[in-house]
Image: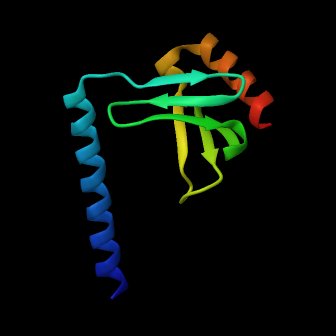
């Protein structure tokens, strides 16, 4: 039934999140975020991606967190917090993103 499906799906998702957290801790490596004229680059212990700006559907700021929303996937977003980079840099990046994604 639906309740057991929901419970199983939630448990699988939480296990996946916990596994990713542990993998990132084990890698002992910070992610890299680059904002270039032609693309956004994200690099972590598993991925090194250059994503052209037209691949994003929108951006939004919620509670001092910048969401870069991809056009594809199940509401896939890259999320960067003001607390991670500071107020001044966050404002600079947000203004840049406004020009690129609108």
The colour scheme used here is: rainbow
Residue 53 position in % (x across, y down): 70, 37
Q: Residue furthest top?
A: 88
Q: Residue furthest bottom?
A: 1
Residue 102 position in % (x across, y down): 80, 37
Q: Quadrant of the N terminus?
A: bottom left
Task: Depth check: give the residue in front, 41 or 99.
Answer: 41
Q: Is residue 78 above or below residue 13?
A: above
Q: Quadrant of residue 4?
A: bottom left
* Residue at 30 percent of width and 22 percent of height: 29
Task: Depth check: give the residue in front, 38 or 96.
Answer: 38
Q: Is residue 63 left or right of residue 44?
A: right
Task: Depth check: give the residue in front, 96 or 36.
Answer: 36
Q: How many marks?
A: 0
* Residue at 52 percent of width and 36 percent of height: 79
Q: Is residue 33 shown to the viewer in this render? A: yes
Q: Is residue 52 left or right of residue 10?
A: right
Q: Quadrant of residue 51?
A: top right
Residue 66 position in % (x across, y down): 60, 33
Q: Is residue 74 above or below residue 53?
A: below
Q: Is residue 31 left or right of residue 23?
A: right
* Residue at 67 percent of width and 45 percent of height: 55
Q: Quadrant of residue 9?
A: bottom left
Residue 39 position in % (x across, y down): 65, 30
Task: Depth check: give the residue in front, 62 or 26.
Answer: 26
């Amino acid at each position: 039934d639906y309740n057991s499906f929901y419970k199983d799906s939630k448990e699988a998702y939480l296990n996946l999140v916990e596994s990713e957290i542990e993998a990132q801790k084990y890698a002992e490596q910070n992610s890299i975020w680059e904002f270039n004229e032609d693309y956004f680059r994200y690099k972590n212990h598993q991925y090194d991606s250059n994503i052209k700006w037209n691949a994003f559907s929108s951006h939004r700021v919620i509670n001092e967190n910048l969401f870069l929303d991809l056009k594809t996937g199940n509401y896939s977003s890259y999320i960067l917090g003001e607390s991670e980079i500071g107020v001044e840099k966050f404002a600079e990046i947000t203004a840049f993103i406004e020009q690129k994604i609108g």
